[in-house]
Structures are given as structure tokens and as C-alpha cells.
Image (tube, coloured by chain):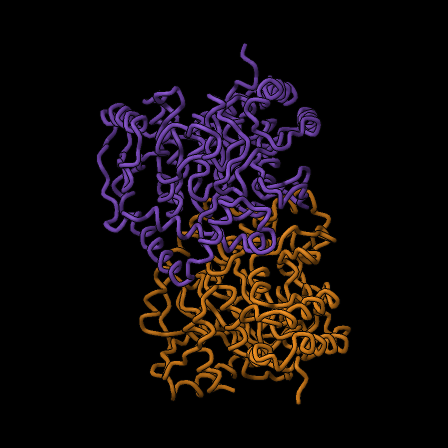
Chain colours: A orange, B purple
């Protein structure tokens, strides 16, 4: 029998609910894996083995608590935790101890999850990399900003983890690490207690190794139980969106795109190029400008009083964000609002959009976590996204694509994701 | 010559910029007023006289810092401050010390404001009252949840203060205390470091004693300098919105409505009843349901681990919020999204909407801060609002009305507010 840390979250949750697996046994297998691999992967900022064992024993001794009963959870270190420091990947927050849990963490604990540790984030969830390495090849980046959360799940250290996305910080590390990442619809998961970047786009989500696992976690975060039911569609109407920046896609991604279209088109009710809004060409630039401006506003005090505690790259971003005029940002936001409304028409014709997650395999080296280019449009539009890991690139690292759903249709998106994975893997 | 604490923010800012008034002198007059009145009004949780004097001297000795140079500022105690505790009106946060300033606070300091103290909030900016009394009559409530911020400005303790609104927490205390409160357009002021309630509606704003003062503060918060320019319109197209709950308005508000319409209609290019969307009747109930659900989500950890530290009324609200199904909330949000789009048509015909701020004068007694009924629609729609204090009710307390503007037209709203006040006061 395989070690319990190799079970999917869904398998482990079933075994835990039947009391065929104890939370303590699962946790000990996860801790063994971490002991074996953490020196190489470096996914955690804080690991709370003792506290987690205590929680596991309490769960084993008590009634079933909820859909995540007994599952170890990794928490990106920009989520407040009452029992562990929250340092946001920044020396400015060294040793910082919040008073209460972030809402998303509290929801997971309430559902029975065990917070096993805080995972490495890039600096303040921006672009300056943390220490985490790609579990498939330590010379490569795990992607970011939710680097440790993605790497820990990919490396079987724990079954589920929390992350956030403003541009591509869930989908891209999921792609780099070959796991399923879900960014729920904007506005559906509480953000209280999560260090803000760009208020109009920051979204809480998470990672699992299967579509069902990511959906299980998202069901707790959104409170929408339909995400756990996963009623598979008979067929699917797929809109293909290479998007305005397709020329940036590298050969690995192009090959994986062709593989997906060949496998899905014959079985889909519809699978064709979807026509984007006419003025969509600069969507990524609009998203980037709004993000820079809102992030600079959110980090005003860090920028003002703690400049020496910020990386030069982040200072540059904040300088640039502050320089963007509020009136110009309002014009960008007005375009975004029109796109959000206009995109609804596409979802009359398609159940989901298939589109790239990243420009290539995980970047070589640990300094650069990768370009969020292909994620920017969907973050700006607030649509639910899921990364499908189903292929391997030239250097043996994972690649895949993302599915994008209609706002609020997270449960249908995840059922569609399962439909696709059944045909792709 | 009047004491400097009696100057409007705009007057004081001009005198400070010309170095005819020192920040220290202004601050000392404010401190004198506070010493005289605070025992009665109880606007402050923390007063930092020494720290403020130090900041004032530094400002007097240095270059002009920005539009708020040398102005003492009150900060609602749900905004993080690096140099003062942030207790959110709740024993759960007793002595809590954040690491950095809330973004809005940092923006004000950067513009030269002096944080003089943290002001009383209701419990976690919800309905359970704090200790503040109405400056006009200590037996009456100052309104809430931004109680201390409104009372301190109304009582000439300081010229400007920060607050937040989710239902009516800026407009209503402004009405109770007879000052100008501004709730900017949703999404235009950074919320980082402000204790969240309902994420889709929480808005940072503030108080001044004049329209120009509130606009000055809002210009710094939004980064939109047009708010300081105040180019008055020659005339105005006013849509009158008694709204679906007009029957709840008490005689004082009805009288003030009639007074306003009589004064404005003859000089307005248009002043007529505006037709609201057909299904707008239950807008307040929709707002209340979303607020209860989102607040309960945001306060998951407080509700789960700190129930004994919450008031029974807040526990009841959170229980109720948790019981509202996520799918039902999504349906409410879909209606709100349609209203947000639909209301745009009204602003083709009207520059602003005139509508009640509160159901009556400030409530008698200190237990109940008042009903936000008339503010709920505009908070849900995310529109900019300003309270106009221009009348007095039967018991001698202030009354007034609010103006509501098009989303993003905060500068035009404040110019319209000045146009109205010129004709009402």
C-alpha cells in the first residue's frame, strides 16, 4: 500500500471519514516526506509539526468536523495565522504575529484541516523570488508567487494548500509544478487577513494534485457545496483562446496546445477558435497598469517608511505604480468593466475557454518565477480559472493549459476540467 | 481671531502652506479643545498628544509635504497604525499593534497629515455602539460605525478624520453630527490595513466640516486632484430619489426634504422625481443579506474562536450571515451587478441624485447608532455619496440629505454638493 501522503486529498478524506485512516497517520507520512525532501525543495517558512500532531490527535479523538477533516494544509505566508508568524516573504514582517486567522484559513480549519505550516511566497506576493525550488528539478523555479504552496503539494508533502493570485500566482506555479491550481471567481472567497496587493483582482484559491482535490478545497473556500458534487457533463462546448499574446508561447506550450485540441475536439460538442472582444489586444497591459497602481497604493507605508526593506525590483514596481495617474487608472478600470460585461456573450456559446497557462516550462534558475502574461486577462476579468497538468515539456518539466469559466460558474468549470482531464491524461 | 481649531481644513491648510499658521499652534488649539470636551464627547480610544506634537514640530521645521500639511487627523480604530494600537472596538484586539499603517493612513501622512489619535468605532465597525456621545447633546448617539471620527470633527477637536462605510457608517454619523461625510466610489481608495467587513462594499472615506474639506481629504485618499479644484457647475440636473423606504422617514427628514427641494428646484436645470429600476423595492434587503454573509465570512475566526469576546448582537448577525447559502448570495450579487449597470442610465439624465441620509435626527440614547436603511442602496451600488448638513430637527439636532453621484465622478459630486450647500445654508 502506498504511503498516505501519496493519496489524493479526496481519497484521504474518504478514508479519514470512514476512520480507516487516522489524521495522525496521514500527518506522519507527510512529515516523513517533508523530512526527506524539504532540504532540497524548501517549500516552508514555518513548519509546525508539534502543533499539527496535536491537532491531528484531537481530530482523531473527536467527531468528524467537515469536508477537510484531518487533511494537512499548507498556507502561503501572506495569510494571517493566529498560531504561526506571518512574514509575507519580507523582512519588514519578520516575526510578525497576527491576532486572528485569515478568513480562508479559519474556514479550512473549521472544515477540519490541519495547518501544517506556512509556505514560501515571493516578496509580498510580487515578483522577487523566494527560496523554493521546483520539485521536478531543483535548478528550476517552482513559479510564483504561491511558490511553496505549489511545490509542497506537487512533492507529496501535503495534499492541499492555499495561495492567491493577482496576475498569475496560482495558475503559473501550478503549471510549473504540474498540479491543479484553482483561482475561483473574484469575490467568492473572503480575503480578510490576506496581505493585499491589487484590491480589484487579488483572489484566494489553492492547489491539489487532482481536479477533484482542488474542487474540494474550493468548495470550502467559497461555501459552494456544488464544487464537491462534480456532475460531469456529457459533452462540452470549448472556446479556444490563444489570445493576443500567443506569439510569446514557446514550443512546449504550442505542442501541448496541439495535443489538447486533437484529444478534445473529436469529443466536444464544439471546439473552435473563440472571437475575443475587438479591443482586447492590450488587455495584459491594462491589467499590469492597474496592478502596479493598486499594489503601490496598498503598500504605501512599506514604500514610504520601509524602502530599505524592499527589493530593488519591488521598489521599481511601486515607483512605477505611484506614477500612474488615478484618472488614467480609472479609464483602465472602465475598460475592464466593459470587458467583464462583454465576455458574458462568449459564455453563451462556450461552456469554457481553453487557453495557455504559461509561456513555457518552469524557468531555468531560481531568480525569475516566470511571466504571468497568459493569466493577466482572466485575473483582470475576475473569471474562475483552473490549470490542467497533462503534459511534459522538452526538458522533462510539466506543462499544461488552463480552462476559464463564466463568473460564478466555478462548479461547472471544475466539472469541465475533470471532463477534459479524463480525455487528456 | 478664532482659535485655529475652528478653522476649516481648507482654511487651515492655506494658512499652514503660507506659514502664517504653524502646525504646532493648530495642534495645540485642537488639544485644548479636546482637553475641554473629551470627557463629555469621548471620541478617542487613543490620543497621541506627544507624538503629534513631535510630528507637528518636524513639519514646521521642514518643507511643505502635501495638501494635508500640518492638519491633525483622527483615524477610526479599524485602520492599522504602526505607532498606535488598533483595537477595532473589540476586546479580541485589545492592545493589538500592527506592523505597518493602513494604506489610507499612510497616504494621509505622506500628504502631511498628523495622526492625532484613534477614534471610537462600534464593535468591529458593526452595530454595537461604542462610548462616544453626540457633541450636540450627550444623551444622543453620534451615529456609527465611524462614531468618534464624526464626533471629533463636529466638535472642533480636529478638522478631518477617516472612517469607513459598508452600509451607512460614514453618511449616517455625518448626518447625526451635522458635518460633511464622503463615501468615495467603491474601488478608488486603498483598503489595505483596514479591518474588513463586507468585501464587496467596504469603502474608506472621511469627514470634514465643509464640502471643500471633505473633498480635500478625498483627493488625497483617491489620488484624484480634481477633487481639490472644485469647478462649480452653473446649474445642476437633480434626480429626486425618495426611494422604496421613504415611508420610514420621520417628520424632521420630510421637512428637510421639502426645504431642500424648494430651495434647489428653482435654480436647477432639472429637479424631478427620478425613476428607479423596477425591481429596486427590496434593494435594502439584498444589501443587508450580502453584508451579513460577507461579514460573517470575514470574521470567521472571531466567530469560531472568540465568540465570548463578541457582543450578543454581533454573534447573532454572524450566525445569520453564516446561515445564508453561498448560492443565494451569488443570486443577490447578480442582481446587484445588474443594478450597478442599470443605474448608469439615470446619470445620463441627472448629474446627481438627492436622497435621504437617515430616517431621523440622531437616536435618543447611546445604545443604538441608528438605522442605515437609506444608505444601503448606494453602498450596494458602490456609488459616491456625500452628506449635506443644512438643517436642524425638532429637538435641535442636525439633519440633512445626501447626494449620490455617478461611479467615478467623485469630483463632480463634490462640486455639485458645494453648489447645493451654497443654496441651502
Report x, y in % for residue A135.
Answer: 68, 77
Q: How many marks?
A: 0
Any part of residue A391 in sight? yes
Residue A99 left/right relative to A356: right
Quarter-wise, where is residue B329 in the image? bottom left
Name the residue at 47% across, 86% down. Answer: A422
Residue A4 left/right relative to B254: right
Any part of residue A322 in sight? no
Report x, y in % for residue B193.
Answer: 59, 46
Residue A146, placed above or below residue B230:
below
Q: Nearer the viewer, residue A219 or A249?
A: A219
Report x, y in % for residue B72.
Answer: 59, 27
Q: Nearer the viewer, residue B361 or A315?
A: B361
Name the residue at 73% across, 63% down. Answer: A46
Of all residues, the one furthest to the top in this rendering is B1
Residue B353, placed above or below residue A317:
above
Q: Quadrant of the N terminus of chain A?
A: bottom right
Name the residue at 57% across, 30% down. Answer: B68
Q: Nearer the viewer, residue A139 or B399?
A: B399
Report x, y in % for residue A370.
Answer: 61, 68
Residue A176 left/right relative to B212: right
Residue A111 left/right relative to B355: right
Q: Nearer the viewer, residue B342 or A223?
A: A223
Amino acid at each position: 500500500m502506498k504511503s498516505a501522503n501519496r493519496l489524493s486529498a479526496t481519497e484521504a478524506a474518504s478514508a479519514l471519514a470512514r476512520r480507516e485512516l487516522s489524521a495522525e497517520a496521514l500527518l506522519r507520512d507527510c512529515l516523513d516526506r517533508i523530512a526527506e525532501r524539504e532540504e532540497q525543495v524548501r517549500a516552508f517558512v514555518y513548519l509546525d509539526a508539534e502543533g499539527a500532531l496535536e491537532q491531528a490527535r484531537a481530530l482523531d479523538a473527536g467527531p468528524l468536523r467537515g469536508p477537510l477533516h484531518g487533511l494537512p494544509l499548507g498556507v502561503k505566508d501572506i495569510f494571517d495565522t493566529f498560531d504561526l508568524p506571518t512574514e509575507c516573504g519580507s523582512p519588514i514582517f519578520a516575526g510578525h504575529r497576527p491576532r486572528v486567522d485569515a478568513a480562508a484559513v479559519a474556514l479550512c480549519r473549521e472544515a477540519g484541516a490541519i495547518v501544517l505550516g506556512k509556505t514560501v511566497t515571493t516578496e509580498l506576493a510580487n515578483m522577487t523570488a523566494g527560496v523554493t525550488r521546483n520539485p521536478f528539478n531543483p535548478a528550476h523555479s517552482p513559479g510564483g508567487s504561491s511558490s511553496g504552496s505549489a511545490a509542497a503539494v506537487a512533492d507529496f508533502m501535503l495534499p492541499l494548500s492555499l495561495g492567491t493570485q493577482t496576475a498569475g500566482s496560482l495558475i503559473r506555479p501550478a503549471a510549473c509544478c504540474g498540479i491543479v491550481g484553482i483561482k475561483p471567481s473574484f469575490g467568492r472567497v473572503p480575503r480578510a487577513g490576506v496581505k493585499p496587493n491589487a484590491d480589484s483582482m487579488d483572489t484566494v484559491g489553492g492547489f491539489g494534485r487532482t481536479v477533484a482535490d482542488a474542487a474540494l478545497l474550493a468548495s470550502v473556500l467559497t461555501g459552494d457545496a456544488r464544487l464537491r458534487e462534480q456532475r460531469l457533463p456529457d459533452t462540452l462546448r470549448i472556446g479556444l483562446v490563444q489570445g493576443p499574446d500567443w506569439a510569446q508561447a514557446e514550443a512546449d506550450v504550442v505542442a501541448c496546445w496541439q495535443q489538447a485540441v486533437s484529444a478534445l475536439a473529436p469529443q466536444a460538442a464544439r471546439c473552435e477558435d473563440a472571437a475575443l472582444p475587438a479591443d482586447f489586444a492590450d488587455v495584459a497591459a491594462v491589467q499590469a497598469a492597474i496592478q502596479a497602481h493598486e499594489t503601490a497604493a496598498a503598500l504605501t507605508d512599506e514604500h514610504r517608511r520601509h524602502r530599505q526593506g524592499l527589493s530593488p525590483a519591488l521598489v521599481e514596481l511601486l515607483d512605477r505604480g505611484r506614477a500612474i495617474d488615478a484618472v488614467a487608472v480609472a479609464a483602465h478600470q472602465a475598460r475592464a468593466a466593459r470587458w467583464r460585461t462583454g465576455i458574458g456573450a462568449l459564455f453563451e456559446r462556450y461552456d469554457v475557454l481553453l487557453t495557455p497557462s504559461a509561456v513555457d516550462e518552469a524557468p531555468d534558475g531560481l531568480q525569475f518565477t516566470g511571466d504571468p502574461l497568459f493569466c493577466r486577462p482572466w485575473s483582470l476579468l475576475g473569471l474562475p480559472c483552473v490549470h490542467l497538468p497533462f503534459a511534459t515539456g522538452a526538458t522533462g518539466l510539466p506543462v499544461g493549459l488552463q480552462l476559464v469559466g463564466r463568473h460564478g460558474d466555478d462548479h461547472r468549470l471544475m466539472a469541465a476540467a475533470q471532463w477534459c482531464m479524463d480525455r487528456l491524461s
